[in-house]
Each structure stands twice: as structure tokens, then as C-alpha cells.
Image (cartoon, helix red, strand yellow):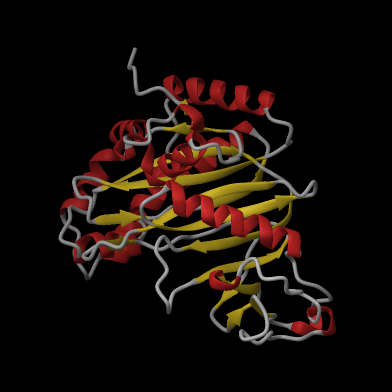
């Protein structure tokens, strides 16, 4: 029987093995090792992805399409490869082991649903990063989870990923995909926190973007989430931070306040999605991240209905020059 790398819990992932578990899973495992609260989950390794692609009936067709890939046929080839991966059955020896781990996960967690996330890695180069491709919310059925896992695997062959690999001079099959299956935490507020390691005089702010519920909306025609920019140099001064936002003030002057607050679509909001207490918690988080890690981080977070803080993703913002991003993140949901 074929033995692939074990399907690991996030807590047991070796975060030096991005080639096996992908960048996202390794970042989350590293956060857990430092004591941060991360939802419980399991990771299906990149080895499973490779084995699946190499054993499905259309694998020879995929090899042919990849070997003849060029700028003129890129979109058509990507679409056909994705269709082959999504429509092919998962071999029984893989399906049984994956389903068993999913069943154990569902029995262990309190939530009735999980999130499916990709955890991508570009082989043979530390200068190239491929961020997570898909996020699927509110999954409950094991059969549905297995089908979405195939969509995650197929995301290694989207046109933008293939185009990015070609532009970077890498082989077009250079992306490995692991899949994270994680407990769905019911969010009262969710957001993104940008943490800078060594802020200069011009870069001394902690940036928070947040919204009610489980999604932070950012659209081409404008950002729909709340934005809070906290001036680190003024933290600790005895100043009322939010004494005017309830009156729909969209800006609090820097010279008199610790934070400036930007409310988009003010007619649709009666209060900010993050309280003064939440912002204080996020400031403490930012300081801990700055202390624990050597690079800037973009942290995806949520506050649940008990006001507990959870971390959902940690994207390192490396200061190294020459780092090239492969592909763009794509989020999906099923209610």
C-alpha cells in the first residue's frame, strides 16, 4: 500500500517543511508553537496532491498540456487541466485515509462546520511565494469536503498562477498545494492587522481593517470595512480614543487622538466593528508579533461572540528584495 506523508494536525506540522505542508500551514503552526490561539485543524500534505495528479486517468493529458504551454494557449490549457483534476475521482486508498482524518476532526471540534483553505508552496526557490488560493466556508459534509479539496488542488493550475510561474522563469508545474481543513469559528468581527517589525518615524502605525461577521470586504470601487490606524508613538497617553465616532466622525486628528478612524459607507453603520477594548487587544498582539518574529506580518484575525481573539492566517511580509508573488488569493464561500 502506498504510504504518503501523514496527514498532520496543524499543531504537529513541522513549520520548516513548507515543501510538504505549504506556507500557510507552516505559518499557522509556528504561531501555535508561540502560544497564539489558532482554530484546530488538519493538513493534507503536498505529497497527496502530487500523488493524486500523477495517478488520475487524465494525467498523461495534463503532462501534454503542460509541456506545450505557451502564452497563446495558457487560458485554454489551464481550464482543461482544472476540469480534469476536479472531475477525476479520488482513489479509494487516498479517500479512505483523508475521510477518516476529517471524521476525527469533526468529532473533536465544537463547530458544526469547517473551513477549507489551500496552503501553497513553490518548489526550489525561496525567492518566490505563492499565497493561498481558495477559502471555502461552512462545509459540513465529508463528500463535499473531498470535492472542494480537488478544487483546491486544481487552483495550482489557474491562469494567473501559470502566468506568474512563466514570468518568473519557473517550470509551470512548480506549485505544490496542501489543504487545511480547520474548525469554523463563529465570528462577531473579523479583520486584518498589519504588523511592522521596526517602524521608522514615517512608519510607526499599526493598521487594522475590520468588519462585522466573517469577511472583510475590499472591492475595486472602495474598501467597505472599517479602517483604524493606531499611532504607536502615542499609545498609553490618557486620551479618549472613540469619544466622537458614534456621532459619525470619519476622522480623528492625529495631533489630539491616538487613532484616526476611517468609516466607509457611514450611512450603513451605527458603530465601529472593533471596540476600544478590541483595539487594545490587537495592539498587544502587534507588540507580541513584533517581539516573536523577525519580519513584518499581515495577520487575519477574528473576535468570536465571547470576545476571544483567534488568528486565521499569518502572511510574512519579507523585507528581502527580489521576492516575487505567484498568483492572487481567491476567496469563496458556501452558506
Q: Is residue 303 left or right of residue 115?
A: right
User: Does the rendering let one see residue 133?
Assistant: no
Q: Please report the residue visible at 22 percent of the width from the left and 70 percent of the height from the top.
A: 72
Q: Is residue 221 left or right of residue 272?
A: left
Residue 140 location, x and y as percent? 68, 37
In the rendered image, the quadrant that contains the N terminus is top left
Q: Please report the residue visible at 20 percent of the width from the left and 66 percent of the height from the top.
A: 167
Q: Quadrant of residue 2?
A: top left
Front residue (pair 114, 245): 245
Residue 74 location, x and y as percent? 27, 64
Q: Please report the residue visible at 28 percent of the width from the left and 39 percent of the height from the top.
A: 59
Q: Is residue 297 left or right of residue 224?
A: left
Check the image and report above or below for 268 versus 12.
Answer: below
Numbered label tally: 0
Residue 119 location, x and y as percent? 42, 45
Front residue (pair 104, 241): 241
Residue extending farthest to the top is 1
Q: Please report the residue visible at 40 percent of the width from the left and 73 percent of the height from the top.
A: 200
User: Does the rendering let one see residue 272?
Assistant: yes
Check the image and report above or below for 36 versus 202.
Answer: above
Check the image and report above or below for 88 versus 228.
Answer: above
Residue 283 location, x and y as percent? 60, 59
Front residue (pair 94, 114): 114
Amino acid at each position: 500500500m502506498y504510504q504518503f506523508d501523514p496527514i498532520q494536525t496543524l499543531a504537529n506540522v513541522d513549520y520548516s517543511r513548507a515543501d510538504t505542508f505549504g506556507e500557510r500551514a507552516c505559518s499557522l503552526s509556528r504561531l501555535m508553537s508561540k502560544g497564539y490561539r489558532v482554530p484546530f485543524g488538519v493538513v493534507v500534505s503536498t505529497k497527496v496532491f502530487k500523488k493524486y495528479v500523477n495517478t488520475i486517468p487524465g494525467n498523461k493529458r495534463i503532462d501534454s498540456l503542460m509541456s506545450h504551454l505557451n502564452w497563446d494557449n495558457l487560458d485554454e490549457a489551464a481550464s482543461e487541466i482544472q476540469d480534469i483534476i476536479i472531475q477525476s475521482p479520488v482513489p479509494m486508498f487516498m479517500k479512505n485515509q483523508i475521510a477518516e482524518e476529517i471524521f476525527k476532526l469533526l468529532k473533536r471540534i465544537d463547530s458544526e462546520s469547517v473551513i477549507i483553505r489551500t496552503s501553497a508552496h513553490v518548489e526550489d526557490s525561496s525567492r518566490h511565494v505563492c499565497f493561498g488560493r481558495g477559502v471555502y466556508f461552512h462545509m459540513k459534509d465529508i463528500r463535499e469536503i473531498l470535492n472542494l479539496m480537488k478544487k483546491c488542488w486544481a487552483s495550482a493550475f489557474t491562469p494567473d498562477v501559470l502566468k506568474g510561474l512563466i514570468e518568473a522563469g519557473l517550470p509551470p508545474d512548480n506549485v505544490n498545494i496542501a489543504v487545511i481543513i480547520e474548525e469554523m469559528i463563529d465570528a462577531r468581527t473579523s479583520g486584518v492587522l498589519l504588523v511592522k517589525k521596526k517602524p521608522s518615524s514615517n512608519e510607526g502605525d499599526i493598521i487594522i481593517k475590520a468588519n462585522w461577521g466573517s469577511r472583510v470586504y475590499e472591492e475595486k470601487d472602495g474598501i467597505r470595512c472599517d479602517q483604524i490606524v493606531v499611532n504607536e508613538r502615542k499609545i498609553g497617553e490618557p486620551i479618549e480614543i472613540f469619544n466622537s465616532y458614534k456621532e459619525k466622525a470619519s476622522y480623528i486628528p492625529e495631533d489630539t487622538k491616538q487613532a484616526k478612524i476611517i468609516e466607509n459607507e457611514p450611512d450603513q453603520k451605527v458603530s465601529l466593528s472593533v471596540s476600544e477594548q478590541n483595539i487594545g487587544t490587537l495592539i498587544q498582539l502587534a507588540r507580541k508579533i513584533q517581539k516573536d518574529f523577525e519580519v513584518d506580518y499581515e495577520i487575519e484575525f477574528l473576535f468570536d461572540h465571547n470576545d476571544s481573539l483567534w488568528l486565521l492566517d499569518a502572511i510574512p511580509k519579507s523585507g528581502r528584495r527580489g521576492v516575487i508573488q505567484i498568483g492572487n488569493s481567491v476567496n469563496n464561500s458556501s452558506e
